[in-house]
Amino acid sequence: MSGPMVGIVGAGAVGQTLSAALVAAALPGRLLVVSRQQDQVHGLVADLQDLALAARSRTTVEAGEVAYLQGCDAVVVALRTDFVNTAERDIRRGGAAANAPALGTLARDLHGYGGTVLVVTNPVDLMARRFAEVSGVARVFGIGSNLDSARYRLLLARYAHVTPDVVSGHVIGEHGDRAVVCVSTTTVDSRPVTVPVRTVVEDLQRRPELIRSGIGRTRCGPTGAVLSTLRKTLGLVDGVEELSVPYGDVWLGIPLRFTGGKAEACLPPLTRFERLCLDSAASSLRDAYAHLPAHTERIAT
């Protein structure tokens, strides 16, 4: 076996899609799938093993327990508890009260883990912070703003009739209603944008509902964001990802430049309006975190 060992916690819609993509891409040498639903996880592992053989992937797949995650180079947290999301605003925050206790328990169990943790569970900015505070893990990143940024660049490229690789721009702040589009530093083919950015932003805001109404839950986009981020956090490639990390006394999405697996913040210059929007997102996330269910897990020191 060669290649890194990656663990995935959660065998639901996102966990299934992500696991299949990792196997198809042969990114990890070994993939460990962990879930509370034993029938589900063993069925998924069998299906992934079939995929690996048919696709001639070198990845070996197995079911495991939380304790086995300590041996992984990276762990992706995609757990989701059973709840009905009735939120009409701040939809991604709808699962905060339900997901926080389960995520906190996992974080406590992974106290002392020395690898990289990518949190996908929503609300991702709050859950990444909760996981980091409870576990004491040094390298925790929330997936969210990089998906927003990828969508922004894709939509902008369509309006500009160019390929997305010549579009440069970031979406930062909260992965949710308070996402901040860095319009002032967005370029197309290294030139300031000349397309209707407001229309692009409106399309960006409508995109999650388009996906939810069609297939029930976003799964492929987060999977792509995780794959891209894993390659950088594991030091396989260098580049920039917008990820949720500490920003003052909150966690929110900012661009990070990875070199050899090491991350350095590279927040672009912001206009006064963009800065105010980012501060507003931070204030809202600060308040939302204070209202999460009180947790009894020991805060790691």
Image (cartoon, rainbow, N blue to C red):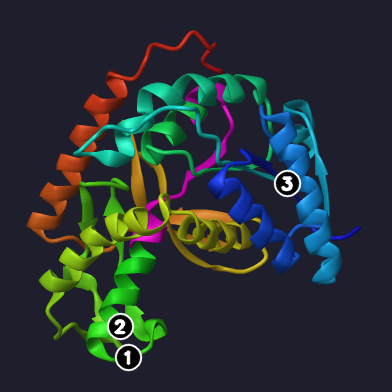
225 vs 78: above or below: below
Q: Earlier in the sequence, mark 2 or mark 1?
A: 2
Q: Amino acid at mark 3?
A: Leu
In magenta segment, residue 198: no
Q: Position of residue 31 (x, y in %)?
A: 77, 49
Q: Amino acid at mark 1?
A: Val
Furthest residue toward top? 296
Q: Is residue 282 visible?
A: yes
Element type at mark 2: helix
* Of marks 2 and 3, the one in the foreground: 3
Q: CA distance from mark 2 to mark 3?
A: 36 Å
Residue 293 placement, left or right of 259 = left
What quarter of the picture does the N terminus occupy? bottom right
Residue under numbered circle 1: 162
Q: Residues within 10 Å of mark 2 (few under 14, many from 20)?
A: many
Front residue of this view, candidates 206 and 140: 206
Residue under numbered circle 3: 44
What is the magenta range? Answer: 132-148
Q: Position of residue 276 (x, y in %)?
A: 11, 48
90 vs 167: above or below: above
Q: Amino acid at mark 2?
A: Ala
Q: Is residue 4 visible?
A: no
